[in-house]
Image (cartoon, rainbow, N blue to C red):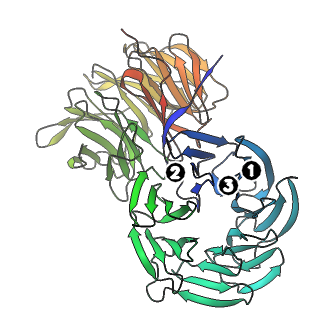
Amino acid sequence: MLCSIYPHEMYCLSGQVPFGLKLHPDRKHLIYPLGSIIVLKRIEDGKLEFLDGHSNNVSCISVSKSGSYIASGQVNFMGFQAPVIIWNYAERTIHVELRIHNTKVESVAFSPSEKYLVSLGGKDDCRIFVWNVETKQLICRNKASAQGHCLVVEYSKTDDTIFASAGRWVDGISSHSRMCWNCIRYVFMISEDNRYMYCATLSGDIMKIDVKRKILSICGPGKAKFIHGINVLKLLESGDLLVGSGSGILALCSQINFKPVREIQLENAVTSIAISEGGEQFYVGTEEAQMYRLHLKDFTAELISTGHRSAVKDVALPHATSKLFATCSGEEIRVWMVGKPKDQLRITVPNVTCNAIDFMHDDCSIISAWSDGNIRRFGMKGQLMVVINNAHRQGVTAIAGTKDSKRIISGGGEGKMHVWELLPHTHQILNIMVGHRRPVSCLKMKSDDKECVTVSSDGFCIIWDLVHFHARQKIKTDTLFRNVCYHPDGYQIVTCGTDGKVIYWDVMGGTNIREREDAETGVYNSIHTTQEGSHFVTGGEDKRVKVWDYMQGKITHISMPAGACITCTRICTLNRILVSTSADGGIWLWKFPHLASSS
């Protein structure tokens, strides 16, 4: 019988989902999407719970007035239905799954009594539906807009028969029906008394519209518009507005003329504002997956968590501690401390992609492989120490350092392997090894530094002699290898790939020793062994992390699914922490279920 493992920490927020960060009415939980799951995070102690039911990335989310229900919509592939799910919050279960929109659900909103839910389809659907939450039946439908693209729906605060939609182009203010008012703008809200509608535009304007009279009441803030437009509006009980802009400005604006009374510059575009009851404290999410806590009184921001906005490509572990780890995603390298959901160091190289990273064995520097063909070595304070320019013609795709910290082995997009010697004030290439015909996707060193193993998208796994600089074994089977690792004894390697098999190979003869298959996974992307070799861990397209007993070749533990496919798995020194990363930018920390061997 398989045992389950659950994450005790997670670093990420899907900041690119508009209005995705919510504060539950109980004021005890933050709610936000990450890939295909919805995260419930208890504010007091950070305890995590997850709602898993979507098949693809969550695109919108709404919480009912009492907090009894959560609604979420998703994106899907062209031509496929994108469901809306209504969740029972108390039971953490699916109340109903509604399938009628095509390709994407753009927005969802509950009526004030929680009797109805309105859902808006994306530009390939362009329809609005109203559902009865209790009976789970469709009761009303309409075209979203005569022209343009609707982006959001907002319900009246007091009337179950009125809601509004908004989008990218102006289409005036007109009575569409008793069930729907249209004001085609970018973001907007309805006042508590339903008298006014507040609209914000991509040009940085805010408009207050008298709904009953259908006239513009106020337009501001005048010439001092918000740069890169307004992404979020929140109306406070005082009548003032909280405004989040595309330039990262968060402002408290006067209800009289919408001019900023207070403002603060955040690091990236604001995409969500979640206000607590009374409005004295609120939370802000940004496009780059940062989460801030602010107090209205002093308007100072506390950064409480950070994350990657795109797929994490690699994880590196230091050799002497289990307290740190590093990740790379896009143009960034980040160093994290276990137990702290904020990066301790961030290194950015604009307009290039970091493909792989590794700690040098002395743990004093990080080496990195970049899409511009350069190898960069950084100190632990982020300072650039060494650049090997034009290391590979088609980008550097894999990298590793030796135990003496004097050599770097790199693999390139053209399939070649380069061995570099690091000298006190320079570097030189020792050898170029040819064997792969396509990009090297993974490179692992043997513990004695005399050998390394690589896999490539050409379908080959090659064991390299680093003493005489040639290919010692070339392995090919009916799979596309994705990852490889050495067993600590050095006599075996373990591969995983697109056929869903984990295969043990003899290093000396290159022969297949054992195969194990898990049909549910389909594709494995990552594999890593414990320090003593008694267990290994895999991750793949089924979004789950799996822990295996090495000798028995059996899965002992399996995780709940992440929000996207697993891209990397690593077991920290002393087997205390298991780090996994996913294609949605998520970083997951798990307590490793097996203790390290006393031997």
Going by the numbered disc 2, the residue's amino acid type is: Leu
| Residue 582 appears anywhere in the view | yes
Nearer-the-camera pick, 364 or 419: 364
Is 117 placed above or below 33 here?
A: below
Question: Mark 3 = which residue?
Answer: 75
| Residue 411 appears anywhere in the view | no
Nearer-the-camera pick, 385 or 453: 385
Q: Residue at x 67, y 29 (%)?
A: 520
Q: Determine the secondary structure under disc 1.
A: strand
Residue 414's x, y, as percent? Answer: 39, 43
Residue 89's x, y, as percent? Answer: 70, 46
Question: In the rendered structure, which disc, 1 or 2, sits on the residue that comes first in sequence?
Answer: 2
Question: Mark 2 = which residue?
Answer: 13
Question: Mark 1 = which residue?
Answer: 85
Q: Residue at x 28, y 40 (%)?
A: 366
Question: In the rendered structure, which disc, 3 or 2, sits on the residue that comes first in sequence?
Answer: 2
Residue 567's x, y, as percent? Answer: 51, 38
Mark 1 surroundings: few (<14), some (14-19) or many (≥20) residues within 10 A: many
